[in-house]
Image: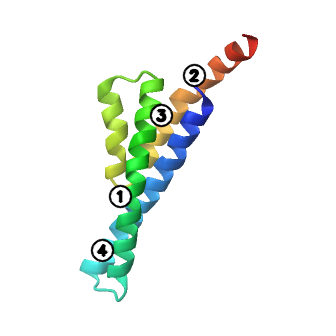
Amino acid sequence: MKKSVLTRYRVMAYTTGVLLVLLCLSMIAKYGLDVDGAADFTRVVAIAHGWLYVLYLIFAFDLGSKAKMPVGRQLWVLLAGTIPTAAFFVERKISRELETRVADEAPAVAKA
């Protein structure tokens, strides 16, 4: 597995996580606090999160298939983008596990 696959996943996990937290805060501002302009901000963030979540799903699925993750674990990674702040914790756990695998495979590729 190439390091770029992990890097793409990490970027999208953080992007999706940040947008989801922003979406939750904007929903609180819109419905709970009745802040002016929160409706427009919520709409923009919701659209951005929706489209970028699709990219997150693609990159997470690519990572899971190349890392040969079990189906249950792959579903856990895919769903992390729907729970506020979960993407950060799942990304950190997956990255720690896979960085060692990427590092171990890099010398083998260089020798070949």
Which residue type carries mark 3? Ile
**Residue located beneath label 4 in the image:** 28
Camera-side mark, 4 or 1: 1
Residue lying at 25% horizontally and 79% vertically, measured from the top left: 32
The reply to whether callout 1 and callout 3 are in contact (CB within 8 Å) is no
Which residue type carries mark 4? Ile
Above or below, 12 relative to 38 = above
* Label 1 Cα crowd, 10 Å radius (few <14 / some 14-19 / many 20+): some
**Residue located beneath label 3 in the image:** 94
Q: CA distance from mark 4 to mark 1?
A: 18 Å
- Looking at the rendered structure, which numbered label has been put on residue 50? 1
Mark 1 or 2, nearer chain start: 1
**Residue located beneath label 2 in the image:** 101
Which residue type carries mark 2? Arg
Q: CA distance from mark 4 to mark 3?
A: 30 Å
Residue lying at 39% horizontally and 68% vertically, measured from the top left: 45
